[in-house]
Amino acid sequence: MRKKKEGPEDLTQRAEMRKLLEARIDRLPEAFRVVFVLRAIEEMTVADTAAILDIPEATVRTRFFRARSQLRETLSQKIDLAVEEVFAFAGERCERIVARVLERIASRT
């Protein structure tokens, strides 16, 4: 399978996503952030992370799980707000979207 060449729009979107992720990682509680960076970014094993931080491996697993959960939650909230903004309008575009949906529904029956 050939990899699609990225255009300027793709690169811009990736840069924006990277900024968003970095900001959200920075907001994690320090104990979670340190474990997340070591495990996800530095790709360290649970055992190595535990040894470096001098904490039990179970604590590493728990903190990593909680860090990922918090990141998912904050990113989900950000996406939900963006979706609300996209569809928080009434007008011509909204009418076109509704018309297309109704056409698809009608064509399936």
Image: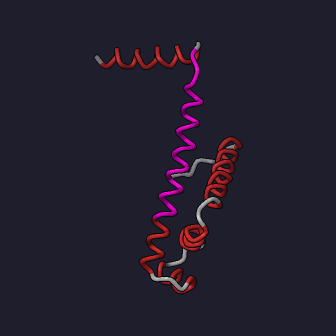
Residue at 56% over, 82% down: 53
**Position of residue 100 measured from the top left corner of the image (x, y, whole percent):** 46, 17
Front one among 42 and 12: 42
Numbered label tally: 0
- Identify whether 39 is placed above or below 9: below
Q: Was residue 94 drawn as part of the magenta stretch in this picture?
A: no
Q: Which secondary structure class fits the magenta region best?
A: helix
- 42 or 53: which is nearer to us? 53
User: Where residue 97 appears, x then y in whole percent?
Assistant: 50, 19
95 shown above or below 3: above
Provide residue 69's location: percent of width, then percent of height. 47, 58
In this view of the protein, which residue sits in the foreground, 39 or 1?
39
Height in image: 67 above or below 87?
Answer: below
Residue at x 51%, y 57% (from the top left corner): 70
Say which residue appears at 54% left-offset and 56% top-offset.
71
Q: Quadrant of the C terminus?
A: top left
Residue 26 is situated, as x and y percent measured from the top left of the image, at: 65, 61
Residue 41 showing in the rendered view: no
Mark yes or no: residue 93 visible.
yes
Residue 8 position (above or below residue 64): above
Quarter of image, res 7: top right
| Magenta-colored span | 66-90
Which residue is painted at 52% across and 15% down in the image? 96
* Most distant residue in the left direction: 109
Relative placement, left or right, of 13 versus 96 is right
Q: Is residue 77 covered in magenta?
A: yes
